[in-house]
Image (spheres, coloured by chain):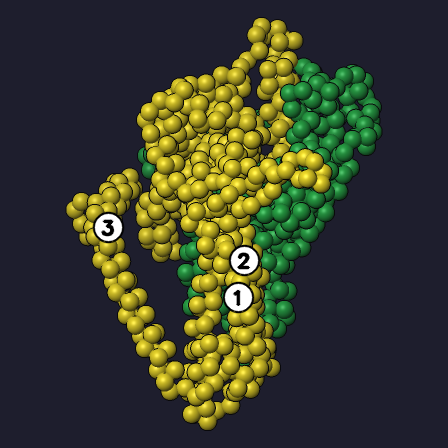
Amino acid sequence: MIQSQKSETPSMKRHMGMKASSRISNTVSYVVLVLISVIWLIPFVCILLQSFRCESTHQVGYIIPQKWGLDNYRNLFNTNFPRWYTNTLITALFVAVFQTIIVLCMSYTLSRFRFKMRKPLMQFMLILGMFPGMLSMIILYQVLKDLGMTQSNAVPGLILVYIASSGMGYYVSKGFFDTISKSLDEAARIDGATRFQVLLKIILPLSKPIVIYTILTAFMGPWGDFVFARYISFNVSAGMNAAVGLYGWLSQDQISKNYTMFCAGGVLVAVPVTILFMCLQRYYVEGVTGGAVKG
Amino acid sequence: MKQLTDLEYLKLSKWKRLLHRLGSFFASIPHGIVNGLISLGRGIKKAAVGLRDDVTDIFATFREGDWSAKASFLVMGTGNIAHGQWLRGLLFLLFEVVFIVYMITGGIYWLSMLPSLGKQGPTLEYDPIYDIDVVTYHDNSFKILLYGVLTIFFIVALIYTWRVNIRQNKLIAQIKRSGKKLKSGKDDLRSLVDDQFHKTLLALPLTGILLFTVLPIFFMILVAFTNYSGTNNGYTNNLFTWVGLDNFNTLLSWKAVGGQSYAATFGEVLAWTLIWAFFATFTNYFLGMMVAMLINKKGIKLKKLWRTVLVMTIAVPQFISLLYVSKMFAKNGLINNFLMSMGWITKALPFWEDPTWARITVILINIWIGIPYLMLITTGILMNIPQDLYESSRIDGANAWQQYFKITLPYMLFVTGPYLLTSFTGNMNNFNVIYLLTGGAPTNTAASSAAGSVGYTDLLITWLFKITTGAEAQYYMASVIGIMVFVVVALISLVVYRCLPSIKNEEDFQ
């Protein structure tokens, strides 16, 4: 096609045409992007606006409240919500610390050491991961119940379970450690450093992105976890986390009474995580992209 | 299937290559089975030879060893202690003492009860002091199964440790003969942060995985062969016991039980799970890629803003956004209310009430959830595509479509192949989206009454969850379904893994 247009004028015309068409396509793109942004943001805007709605507490057909106020937020403190919130926060903080340590131990070892059981261990964990994790919930619930870590004491039980099985999620950070050159380790070893010193003084300072990524995902996991928290708290309000508690407010018999309060609670739960996430966004993107490419 | 040479294979078009790979995979199954059997036989033979060698080795150690080596056969660690390796020796000894104490205090009981899973459940007995009937607990099937499995793990660990202990004696003798010095306890401790550092690092994570993942899964696999349920929980009411393959028979039986047969219900749920996983994976994948390309497009300004808007939606915990959106589409929710107040519809749209509507809505909302992730993932990879590929193709006269199908898509598929596989299996088990959006509703009234209240949007995983809750919980069926999920996931992974180009020709794009 291009070879056939040898003369000057058509190619110039084509050039102008391309410019015009690129302007049109850009406009179309902008329209699509604005549309996408609106669709993606609408639910969140709705939650935010409805949390300030005071004239009624059930679902309505409009978005902008007729009467604005903080009633819903104030009412939250007359419910068990503060307890749920603290439960969630404590769980998330503990899990963020310990899960990070465990995941890093696991992934560093599998990336750096070559021992006899390494390959079988990885294959075994791959197969283990194919079983639905939900199955183990039944037995874990019974065991935790015997240990007295369910219902109103659900928080320690939850923390224990989240942390204990976290070693399985080593893939992303292993991929990261794989990219750090091994010659660094060897150089330090020749200089007389022990393996432990190599990890502490050489690898860790280089791994800031992956450490932050692991902490971030470990923190956000329990913040939004629902199934297991629900199973363990077993309808006892004091042991619920925010997700389970708020879920109850949207049940058939409560929704007309608690709908706007759910929105307020949702805003309070979402805001801290969102701010944290936006600040550390760069690390998250790096981790997610790296993980996907390595599979 | 005809075996192709490399040159013939490269001549084929992309789809024919895929077909060829698929075909040769299935053609290789009989051959593979035969090979598998042969290698299994070899493995058994090798294991037998290994065992024989091991046994002769153990006898040799006993014959040639001094008194302490001989004593270690009964009291573990004697050899180490006699030669000054106090730390190792005491650890061996400690393990043995713990084992014996455990076996006497409980292990023997658990193990002996394992074949029957308990003889007598809780009974009501008259208490003369309080003048009422009180519940007296006897055997507990749940604990018997759990601790029985643990005891077996423990015994295997003891056998292994005993073998290591014997080998230690041989080692000591060897080192003594060569005149070298034995490692002291201090050396052992030092090696734990140096050349044996991986053991230190792995100790904690692996213990956690063993106790909280391996043991439960092992337990639940065994549950599939019992009648453990809410009414037979072995704890507070009737004991449960082994039933062999009965539960698998129930799952695969075509006999109608109050409505459809169980097998038909299972088939329906499985089919929907696969359809859902397919659409959830590929709609997200292609639309996410398109959004990423749109934002990456030359001449688009405020790239960071668009990206941030989407990324922000990842940050909000899923239960909030999913629950909210689910209520938005409810019969009296925001959307229906709005449409009715505008007078565009007179009757509420049955987003969650009609099976087909519900299924489509779930897929659409999942697109809303998934696109931001896919946008993030694909943006990075799109930027990695060598730009000169596009330059040279433009000079050759390719238009945007051709560029997409000949450069972008193959590259993306190649790089993200493994990701697509994990995302597919992940979607099969995507509990959150389904449970928070619909809870499986609308209920499938035609389904087998034995299957619990399974709904039209229920995946296998949410179905499994449903039948494990409530007083009538059918744990045994849940674990059968769990095993089926495993089988399906494993099969898909195996087939796809064999056919993935990124696995087969790792060097293609480099």
For mark 3, what is the residue? B33
N-term mark: 3 or 1: 3
| Tag 2 subunit | B
Q: What hue does chain B carry in this figure?
A: yellow
Label pair 3/1, CB-CB below 8 angstroms: no
- Residue that badge 2 annotates: B106
Secondary structure under the numbered disc 3 in the rendered image: helix
Q: Amino acid at mark 3?
A: Ile
Q: Position of residue A94 (x, y in %)?
A: 69, 52
Q: Percent from the top left, x then y, of residue B456? A: 46, 23
**Residue B504 versus residue B264: which sits nearer the camera?**
B264
At 55% from the left and 25% from the top, the residue drawn is B438
Vertical placement of A95 versus B433: above or below? below
Vertical side of B330 occupied by B185: above or below: below
C-alpha distance separating marks 2 and 3: 44 Å
Give the labeled residue for mark 1. Answer: B99
Disc 1, SS: helix
* Residue B376 seen in the figure: no
